[in-house]
Image (spheres, coloured by chain):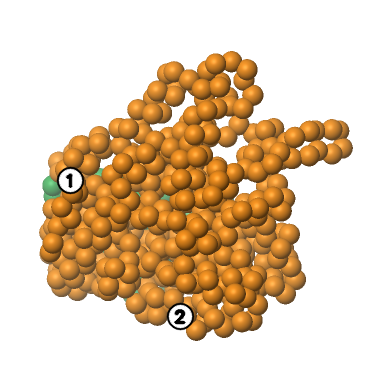
Chain colours: A orange, B green
Amino acid sequence: MQKTVQYNVEKVRQDFPILQRIINGKPFIYLDNAATAQKPRQVIETLDRFYKEYNANIHRGIYKVSEEATAAHEEARAKVARFINARSPNEIVFVRGTTEAINLVAHAWGRKNVGLGDNIMLTEMEHHSNIVPWQLLAKEKGASLKYVGITDQGILERYEFQQHLQSGAKLFAVAHSSNVLGTINPVRELIREAHKTGCCVLVDAAQSVPHMPVDVQDLDCDFLAFSGHKMCGPTGIGVLYAKGNLFDEMVPFHGGGEMISEVHPYESSWKPPPYKFEAGTTNIEGAIGLGAAIDYLSNIGLRKIRLHEREITAYAIDKLSRTKGITIYGPSDPQARGGVVSFNLGDVHPHDMATLLDEDGIAVRSGQHCAQPLHERLGIPATTRASFYLYNTEDEVDRLANSLERVRGIFKL
Amino acid sequence: MSSIYSEIILDYRNPRNKGKLDRAQIRAKDTNPLCGDVIEIQMELDGDSKVKDIRFNGMGCAISQASASMLTELVKGKSLDEARKISKEDILSLIGGQLSAVRLKCALLSLKVMKTGLYNYIGSLENAKEELSSL
C-alpha cells in the first residue's frame, strides 16, 4: 500500500506520554479511541499553565488574571468556530460533551418546535445519546420516533429516509460517523434533501470532527455536536454549533448566573447567545484545553490525519479478515468508513476477548458501545471494537492480529 | 504472561454439571447485565442438609460459565452449611488468577445465584442481602 509521505507517525507518538506505558509487560496499544482519545503534551501543558498562571473565573473579574482567562476562553471559542468553519463564534456554545449538546437541542429547540403527532427521524446506527433525549421529548410532546434502517453492510436505507421525510419529519438527528460500524454517512446530501421538506438536521459529529475536516457551512447542518475528549482535549467540554440565528429563537437550557442580562424577583432577561446557554461557571480550563487540542490537530492537519486513519483502517480490515472465524461489521470500502473496526471471533464473548487482549497490553472496547438498537438490528449480543487515531501504527495492528491468533488458540477455535 | 483462560477454558468447552434436575428443592437464577451472562442453578438435597446433586444452566462469557462449572463441582456432596461458607476467594482460587473489578462480577455470578437459592431455602434471604450484594 502507498504511504502518505508527509505523515510521521513516530513523531506524533512522541507527543503522547501515555503511549510510553508498559501494560502487563508489553507496550501499551491503545485502540479505544472512539471512546476517548489520549492527550498530547501540548494539551497537558496548556492545562498546567492555566492552573499555574491565570486561573480565574471569567467574564466578571475586573483584574488582569481574570481578563487573561476570559480572553483565552473566548479565543478557544473562536478556534472552535474556525475549526469547523462556522460563520461566527456566536454560533458556538460550550457544553459538557455531545450528550449535553443533544439534550440542549431537545430541550431548548425541541420543546418549542416539536408537538403532538410530529415525527423525529433517527437512524438505526445512533448512539444512545442521540436516541434517549428524543425519546424523552417524544414522550413529553406526544411525538413519534421514526428510524431509518440500515443494510447488512451498515449503510443507511435511503428510500426509508425519503419516506420519513415525505411523511413530514420535523427533525432528523443523525450520526456523521457510526461509533460501531464506522460508516460515514453522506450527511451533506441528506441535509440537502431534508431541507427541501423543511426538516431541521442535527449532526452527531462525535466520531467525525476529531478525525476528518468538517465544514458546517459546506454541510449546511442546523446543529452539530461533538466532544473535546475524543479529539485530544479534556473531558467535560464539548461543543454545540447552531446555524445563524437558531440560538436566538431557542429558550434557555439551564438558568443561573452568567446567562442573564437582568434578574428581578419575578422575571429575568437573557444575554444573547452563546452566553444564554452557558449558565454558571463553565468548564473554563476545558474550553482552553480544547483550544489547545484544536491547535495541535490543526498543526498536523485534519486531512493528513484522515488519510493516516484510512490507511490504518484499510490495513486492519485486510489483516484482521485473514483471522479464521472472524466477522467484521460495517462497510467493506475503507473510503466509506472511519477508523472503527468492530468484530466477533467465533463464539468468543467480546468481554473475554477484551480481557485476553488486555493481557497483551491492548486496550479495546467490548459490549454494545452505547448502541443497543444497532446490535439488535445486527442480531448480535455484543462486539469487540478496535478504533484508531492519529498515533496508531500498522505494527500495532499486526500485534492485534497476533493476539487474535493467541485467542483462537486458547479458545480452541 | 499466562492467561487465566488457559485454566478455565476446559470448563468452558466441557462444562461439568450442566443441565437440569427434575427433583430440585433449590432453584435460583440471576443475570449480569455487563456481559449479558445468565446463570440458573438447581440443587437436589439428600435429606435436609446435603447437596446430593447440582446442575447449572446458562449462557454468557467464558468466565461466568466456567466458574459455574467449577462451583457446581465444588458444591456437590457438601452440606448446606459448607456450601454457604464458600467464599469469593474460593472461587478465585478455582479460577486461578486475578481479574479486573468489572470481570469479577462474571466470575462470582454463579456463587451469588447458588447462595441466593440456598438462603431462600433456609429462610434467611433477608439477612443475607449484604453478603449477596458484595458478590
Up the image or down, A158 lies above or below A188; here it is below
Q: Residue A134: where, in percent of width, then height?
A: 61, 63
Q: Residue A66: where, in percent of width, then height?
A: 56, 21
Tag nearer the camera, 2 or 1: 1
Left or right of A223 in this view: A31: left
Residue B105 can be seen in this image: no
Residue placed under numbered mark 1 in the picture: A8
Q: Which chain does the numbered disc 2 sit on?
A: A
Residue at image location 27% in from the left, 68% down from the top: A334
Residue placed under numbered mark 2 in the picture: A157
In front here: A410 or A318? A318
Q: Which chain does the numbered disc 1 sit on?
A: A
Of helix, strand and loop, which one carries label 2?
loop
| Circle 2 residues within 10 Å: few <14, some 14–19, many ≥20 | some
Residue at image location 25% in from the left, 61% down from the top: A310
Among the 4 quarters of the image, the one containing residue B24: bottom left
Q: Residue A13: where, in percent of width, then height?
A: 21, 41
The reply to the same-chain question for discs 2 and 1 is yes
Of helix, strand and loop, which one carries label 1?
loop
Real-space Cα distance between discs 2 and 1?
Answer: 39 Å
In front here: A248 or A385? A248
Residue at image location 47% in from the left, 51% down from the top: A85
Among the 4 quarters of the image, the one containing residue A40: top left
Q: Residue furthest top?
A: A63
